[in-house]
Image (cartoon, rainbow, N blue to C red):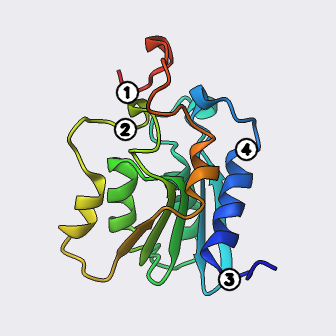
Amino acid sequence: MTDMNSDEFFMREALRVASEKGTDPSLSPIGSVIVHEGKILAACRNQVAEHHDATAHAEIEAIRQAGKAFENGELRGATLYSTLQPCGMCTMASIWSKVGRVVYGAGRDDVHKMYFEARHVDTLAFVAKAYRNDITIEGGVLRDECARLYYRPWDKVPEDEQGNI
């Protein structure tokens, strides 16, 4: 039986949301869930293609939705779950929104480079070097299940499908 307040429980919800419109890896089926005090405040998927908006990443959409539950929009004490290690933009948004914890499934070494913006930028270092000392980041929750949503490092992905080029 799954503990309904466990990281695996909430990551499974992120996986469900990520797969709502299919699992074509070229469309970056990323799911994000934000939880505060055991309650899901937001459950969003990547909507870049639908919104024609490069900032409509799952994590950004979830931060926008969850922020409405707080007068000042700050998500202190909340946990952001993402099926993929957040990119630089989403990591910085997590820091600025005051999320207390980020939990991700697949990391950058588990997927094709097309899902990240640069060769040598370690988004995890953003958290380590942030002025805030009340944010943590943990990876590898349901790593294999999450990684199956994406192209793997060894896949030959056509350049026209690679969003970061």
Amino acid type indicated by mark 3? Asn
Residue at horizontal 61 percent and vertical 87 percent from the top: 37
Q: Earlier in the sequence, mark 4 or mark 3?
A: 3
Q: Quadrant of the C terminus?
A: top left
* Residue under numbered circle 4: 19
Q: Which residue is mark 2?
A: 116
Q: Which mark is residue 164?
A: 1
- The reply to whether dot 4 and dot 3 touch (C-beta < 8 Å) is no
Give how far across and how far down residue 15 sits, in percent: 68, 54
Instruction: Sort mark 3 into few (<14), some (14-19) or many (20+) by Cα contacts within 10 Å.
Output: few
In the displayed structure, would residue 24 be above or below residue 10? above
Tell me the CA gap for discs 4 and 3: 21 Å
Inter-mark Cα distance, 1 to 2:
7 Å
Asked whether disc 1 touches disc 2, contact meaning CB atoms under 8 Å apart, the reply is yes
Report the side of 1 relative to 58 (left or right): right
Measured in 3D between alpha carbons, the distance from the residue under mark 2 to the one under mark 3, in whole angstroms, is 30 Å
Q: Secondary structure at mark 4?
A: loop
Q: Earlier in the sequence, mark 2 or mark 3?
A: 3
Relative depth, front residue between 155 and 39:
155
Q: Residues within 10 Å of mark 2 (few under 14, many from 20)?
A: some
Q: Image point 51% across, 18% down: which residue?
A: 161
Q: Does label 1 or label 2 sit earlier along the sequence?
A: 2
The quarter in which the N terminus is drawn is: bottom right
Circle 1 SS class? loop
Residue 56 in percent (x, y) is at 52, 42
